[in-house]
Image: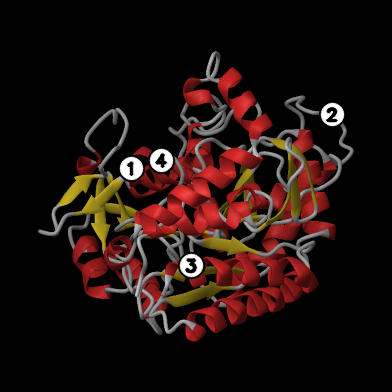
Amino acid sequence: MITAVGSLLDRERARFADTHPRSRELHARARGSLLAGVPMSWMTMWASAHPIYLASAEGASVTDVDGHEYADFCLGDTGAMAGHLPSLPRSAGVTTMLPTEDAAWVGDELARRFGLPIWQFSLTATDANRWMLRICRQVTGRPKVLVFNWCYHGSVDETFVTLGDDDVVRSREGNVGPAVDPATTTRVAEFNEIGSVEEALAHGDVACLLMEPALTNIGIVLPEPGFLEAVREACTRAGALLIVDETHTLSAGAGGCTAAWGLRPDAVTLGKSIGGGVPIGAYGVTAELAERIAAEDDADYEDTGGVGGTLAGNALSLAAARSTLGGVLTDEAFARMSELRERFVAGVEASLERHSIPWSVVSLGARAEYRFSPEPPRTGRESALAGDRQIEEYLHLSLINRGVLITPFHNMALMCPATTTAQVDRHTRAFGEALEELWQ
């Protein structure tokens, strides 16, 4: 049975405080000029009293200002899927408002990987998703978009919605200052429930479905057999476009789930990881959709119509993407990353079995996550209910104190090309030690 988590947390908090004095000093200083003492609000979500402050990062390791080295399975919440690169790639410049040869190379490579021939670039996946929603509404003449319950697609206004227990669409709890109630712009379906998708599409006002092929931000929720094929067919029948957001699910392989599972989207969006940590986003479309976009004479795609940005498609981000896709995130690298993930999962499952703990592990290519339920959740709603904040905080802090980082938002671990078996085994030992204390 689970022991008193509160006392375990107190012990881990004291240990963290004793061993991270320099990080504590820097955080106290930062509170004088940075909101909440961090340069970006998500950094407050680490389980520790304050974030560890970075001194250096290379490969799959980070070192903090107190001299502690960590096996990094967070990897910038997927942004560093390629690992922490030692230097920036050489480029023709940083930003010039001029295209480069690298841009054409990256477009060709993404077309090869995902099977969609036409691409453009942004600075983030959020922008890529936002622009694709605009484009889909433009070419279909329909006002609404469809997403899945408990989805996440970056800070896109239309996607901060959930289904209540009464199946009524509501703005997501904590949604900061929405311009309009997203329930007026968005319909919501439940992942893995095709009837819910068909019901939402039946209104005839949905321009597109924006979806991850597997939910990730609420914990990994994999599609059931036949679900994604049924979604494709339902969108086609309803005249709605299908956008597959592969920002996180790129972990499935070099062409994400789109290639690994033979998906047929009208558009694909990507972000962060393809640039090796340099900010970038991308969106690709079918030849048919590209023709529909070009035929919209009244749409100002080039200037002030709400698509594009001064820094999008800049020379540095495209050089970084070419370097990352050409030499780091290759088919061979993904094969090895998946092998390491299998070793990671085996270690977690062995620890759970040893203590007879009724939890489960879900995998997606190079990515794995432990869930506090006997069976993996099958919908966003089930996944949201499967969390336990206190146990999660204890596990995360215990891992930090033992030299392991996983994503602070949930229990996700990602392998990169530089991850080693020794780092995976370090996690296995640290996870086992944490469970030894927790489950007695």
Going by the numbered disc 4, the residue's amino acid type is Val
Which x, y percent locates residue 121? 63, 42
The N terminus - image quarter? bottom left
Instruction: Tell me if label 2 and label 1 are in contact, CB under 8 Å.
Output: no
Q: Earlier in the sequence, mark 2 or mark 1?
A: 2
Going by the numbered disc 2, the residue's amino acid type is Gly
Residue that label 1 marks: 158
Helix, strand or loop under label 4 = loop
Which x, y percent locates residue 51? 57, 37
Instruction: Tell me if label 3 and label 4 are in contact, CB under 8 Å.
Output: no
Q: Residue at x 65, y 32 (%)?
A: 21
Indicate left or right for 269 with 98 as reference.
left
Q: Earlier in the sequence, mark 2 or mark 4?
A: 2
Q: Earlier in the sequence, mark 3 or mark 4?
A: 4
Picture disc at residue 93: 2
Picture disc at residue 409: none
Residue that label 4 marks: 156
